[in-house]
Amino acid sequence: MLAGGDGRRLQALTQALTGVPIPKQYCRIVGDRSLLESTLLRTRHLVPHERTLVIVNHDHLDVARDQLNALPRHCLLVQPRNCDTGPGLLFSLLHLARRSPQATVAVFPSDHYVGNECRFVEHVQRATRIVEEVPEKIVLLGIPPDRPEPGYGYVEPAQPLRMVGGEGAFHVGRFQEKPTLAGARSILARGGLWNSFVMVFRLPRMLALMHEVLPAEFEEMHSLPADAAVAAARYRDLRPWNFSTAFLARIPEHLVVLRAEDVQWSDWGTQQAIERTFKSLKIRPPWRARKLAPAAA
């Protein structure tokens, strides 16, 4: 699970709800669980907590520990600072490779809303079965869009994946991160899906591809020294890079997208996205009920 985002765009909203500008994944925006707590509970239907790794930023460690007390201590990874999704994910995978080098891995962002937990888990289980049959592929869950959204990543399906149980799974013709509004409309017209950033893959295959496509970034992370203090100092100097833009967009031929229907998914990256979810649930946003008006982020 990736929980290292700083959530700056929603700090005004989270401060209005909690009194402090914490990242959105730690905020109980709907119900009695935060997005992080909900994601951890969701993964329990797939693997036990002992096989779940969560990566957080050092600055968020206090609030993270409070919400992850059901997780064994050795399953909490701490990065010195947020360097975007690329270093955070590579840091986690290299750590996992030392524990279980042949693992099949499922990646979950901790700051997304999922309304239909059962259907979501079913799709992840199907993605895992696909990886068992075609271990050279990375399987992404693709969300059927209901609007052109330039803030999301898009996956354009190509020919169907020919295998038993592969219904709704496709090879990928193109991956594009955050197109223009006109570009998003064009992608939708060609049958594009939103990238949920939920993916399943074999760990050796992913690491081999990352080493091939991003050799400098891979070696920089791989060469961090064993001394924790020295490694932390060097980590803080790493160049941030985005996993989707720098990696996924460059390897469409190695991807499979699985159409994930009926999961009621939303990337809560903006207040508007959150309010859209509340509207679909027919409930009043808590900041409106409390007559709070968060300032524009």
Image (tube, rainbow, N blue to C red):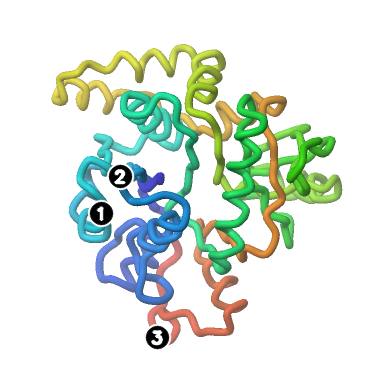
Q: Secondary structure at mark 3?
A: loop
Checking the image for residue 203, the label placed there is none
The quadrant of the picture occupied by the C terminus is bottom left
Q: Position of residue 252 (x, y in %)?
A: 70, 28
Disc 2 vs disc 3: which is toward the camera? 2
Q: Position of residue 266 (x, y in %)?
A: 57, 61
Check the image and report above or below for 239 versus 119. above
Q: Does residue 48 appear in this view? A: yes
Relative horizontal placement of residue 230, taking residue 108 as reference (left or right)? left
Graded by Cα atoms within 10 Å as few (under 14), some (14 to 19) or many (20 or more), the crowding at tag 3 reads few
Name the residue: 61% across, 28% down. 135
Find residue 14 and report its image quarter.
bottom left
Q: Badges 1 and 3: C-beta atoms under 8 Å apart?
A: no
Q: Does residue 182 appear in this view? A: no
Find residue 118 and report its image quarter.
bottom right
Amino acid of disc 3: Lys
Front residue (pair 164, 36)? 164
Checking the image for residue 291, the label placed there is 3
Q: CA distance from mark 1 to mark 3?
A: 28 Å
Checking the image for residue 56, the label placed there is 2
Q: Badges 1 and 2: C-beta atoms under 8 Å apart?
A: yes
Find residue 272 and report its image quarter.
bottom right
Q: Which residue is mark 1?
A: 64
